[in-house]
Image (cartoon, helix red, strand yellow):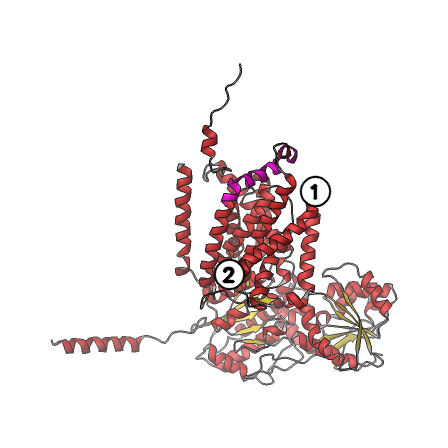
Amino acid sequence: MWVRFCERWFGLLLILGLACLPFFLDKYTQFVVNLILVYVTVGIGLNFLLGYTGQFAFAHAALMGIGAYTVGLLTTRLGISFWIALPLAGVAAAAIGGIGALPALRMKRAYLALVTLAFAELIQWVLIRWKDVTLGTDGVSIRPPRFFDYALKGDYKIFWLILVVTVIMYVIARRLTESRIGRSWVAVRENEIVAQCNGINVTATKLVVFMVSAFYAGIGGGLFAATLGYIVPDGFGLLQLVLHFSIVVIGGMGSVFGGVIGSLLLTTLPELLREYPQALELIYGILLCIFIIFMPTGIAGFLKQWRVLPPEVMSRNWQALRDRPRPEKRS
Amino acid sequence: MSTRRIGAGIATLVLAGLLATPALAEPGVSATTIKIGMFGPLTGPVSVYGYPINNGAIAIYNEINAKGGINGRKLEIVHEDGACDPAKTRAAVKKLISRDEVFLIHGGSCSAAVFAAREEFVEEKVPFMVMAATMDKISDPMDKYIFTTTLPGSGDGRVMLDFIKTIPGVKRLAVVRNKNEWADAKLEKFNANYKAAGLEVIADVELARNATDATTQALAVKQANPDATLLVTYPGESAVFLRDALKYGLKGPYIGTNGIMDVLDLKDRAGGAEAVKDVYVSAFLKGPIGSPEMKEWTDIYVKQFPNDKLQSLSFYGMSGALTVVAALEKAGKDLTREKFIAALESINKGNAGPAFCEVQFAKDRRQGCLDGTMWTLSADGNTIVNLGPSWKKIK
C-alpha cells in the first residue's frame, strides 16, 4: 500500500516536473527530451514482446515505421486530423503486426527472429517501392498537429502532446502487466507447456502480445514523425532496431520502468558523448557487453535488486493474494 | 524637488542607459572569431565518407586562419555528428544553433538527414551552405538561407544524359541502380528527359546497397542487350557489377554518376583495367587526383591532414568553404547574417577551388554549381582523361 502510494506521488511529481521543462530548456535539449519520451513508448512496446513474453521478434522498427507513415500519409496527403491519425497509426501497426505474427506464432528463438526480420525487410521494401502511396525514398514531410486553430509547431509545443500520450501509454502498460493478460505473457515466457496446462491459450496470448507491442510501436512511430517533421524508409531499418533492443536490454527486460530508464540512457548518452564521436561506438558496445554479462535484467532489475526501485507486482490485488488463507500443511 | 523634475531625471537616465547599451551582437561573431557550425556522418557506417568530406572544408578554413583570418577574425569550427540519421542530424543542427550559437552552418553529406534538418535553418534564419548532399529538394524550391555549391542530383543526371546523347549508335539503355534517395535524385531529371532525347530504357535493374554479387543484374542486362548501361550505384556496388559484367561478357559503354568519378579507385575495386575500360563517369572536379589542376588543393589538404588517404571525397567540401570565405570577406567587418546572405547572393563567377564550375548565386538562385564534365580511363588504364561534356574515342 505504502509503496504504491509513494509510487503514485512520485509519478505525479515527475510528470509535473517534466511539464515545466519547456520553460527552462533550450531547443536542442527540448528536442532530445521529446525523443526520450517517444522512445519510452517504443521501448515499453518491445519490452512486452521481448521482456515479458520472451519472444525474439525483430520487426519492431519496421512497425514503428508503419505508425510514422500512417500519421505522415494520413495528415499530409489526405488531410486527416492528427488526432485521428495517431490512434490509427497504432491500429494499423497492430493489424500489420498481427498479420505478420500469424506465421511466427509456432516458431521460437532463431526461427522467430529470422521470420520477423524478413517481415521487417518486407515492410521496408514496400515503404521504398510503393512510391505512389508512400512517396518512396523522397520521404514524407509531416504537417504539425493542430489543436483547433493552434498549431503544435516546434519542439516546445509538441512536447505537451508527447508527454500526455507517453503518460497514457505508460499507465496502460502498468495496468496491462498487472492484469491477467500480463501474467499470461510471463507464464508463456517461463514455460509454454506449463502455461497451457494452467489454461492459458498460448497462441492467442502470443498473438495479443504481438499486436499490443505493435500498437505501442505504431503510436511511438506517430509521435516520432510529429517530432521529426520528416520521415524516410531508411529511418526504420537495422540501426533503429538495434536502438530499440538496447533500450530494452539495458533499461531492463520485463520491466515497464525499464523502458523509461533505457530510453533516457540510450537517447541521452550519444548526445552527452557528442564531443567524442570516435569513442561513442566503442562505449556503446562496451556498455552493451557489461549489461548483458553483469546485469542481465538491466538497470531496472539491478535497482530492484538493491531495493532502490520497488518491485513491479503483477497483480493489482497482490496484498489480498499475499494475505489469503493458506491450506494447512499436512504432517 | 518637484515630481516633474524627478520624472525628467528618470527619463534622462533611462534614455542614457538605452543609448549606452551596445547593439545586440550577431550570434557567433565576436571581435576575434566567427563561429562556423559543421555537421556530417562521423559515426555509423557512412562515417568513412563523413570525415574526408568535412576535412576538405576544414583544411580551407584552417588555411584562411593561418593567413590571418577574415577581416581580423579567425574562423572557429564547431563540429557535430549527424550519423547520417535524420533524428541525430536534426539534434546536431539544433545544438549548433541554440547552444553553440554559430553564425552559419556548413555541413551535411546525407541528403535525407540534411532535408530533415532543413526546417531548422529556415525557421531560425541561420545561413546554411550544403557540404555534399545532392538531393534537389534541399535547395529547390529555394529558401533565402540555404545555399549549395555541390552539383545537385538533377545536374548529375543532366550531365550524364547530355553525354549519352553524343555517343554514336546509342539508343537503348539499361539502368543499374541503387534504390535510395541518392539514386532517385540522380535519375529524376534523367527519367523526365531521356525520351525527348530519342532514348529508350529497356531494362531497369536494382542492385542492393553493399551487394557483393551482381550475377543476377549482369545477366538481366545481358539479356536485354542494351547499347549502353547507366550505373547509378555507389562505388562498391559499381565495382561488383563491372566485375560480374566482365565475367559474363557484357559490353559497354557504361555511364556512371559522379559518385564513382574516381575511376582509378574503381579500377582497383573491380579487379583491373579490363573491367572499367569502357566506363565514362560524370565528374564535378577540375581534374583527377594528382593532376596539375588539383595540385593547389591537394597541397592544402595534405598540409592539414597528412595522415589521410587522399580521395575525391577529400575535395567535396572545398568549393562551399571557399564560397563561405569569399562571402564573409565581402560582408565586411560589421558582419551580420543579412549582410552575409547579400554577399553570397552577389557572388558571380566565384572561385569553386577544385570543383569544375564557377560559383554563381543570385537573389533567386541558390544552386551555385550546375556544371559537370565526363571522365574516363586512358587507353593504358593508368590515368584519368577529362573528356568534357561529349563523347570522344580514346586512343
Image quadrant where residue B54 sits: bottom right
Pick whichever, A299 or A281, lies toward us. A299
Question: Residue at the spot x=62%, y=66% of the render?
Answer: A139
Q: Tag 2: Cα neighbours inside 10 Å, few (<14), some, or many (≥20)?
A: few
Residue A106 circle label = 1
The secondary structure that dominates the magenta segment is helix
| Circle 1 or circle 2, nearest the eye | 2
Q: In this rendering, is residue A260 above or below B290?
A: above
Left or right of B8, for residue B345:
right
Q: Is residue B303 magenta?
A: no
Crowding at dot 1, Cα within 10 Å, few <14 / some 14-19 / many 20+, comes out as few
> Which residue sits at x=67%, y=79%?
B356
Residue B64 falls left or right of residue B384: left
Seen at 42% across and 51% down, the residue is: A15
What residue type is disc 1 on? Arg
Q: Which comes sooner in the sequence, label 1 or label 2?
A: 2
Q: Quick check: can you spot residue B291?
A: no
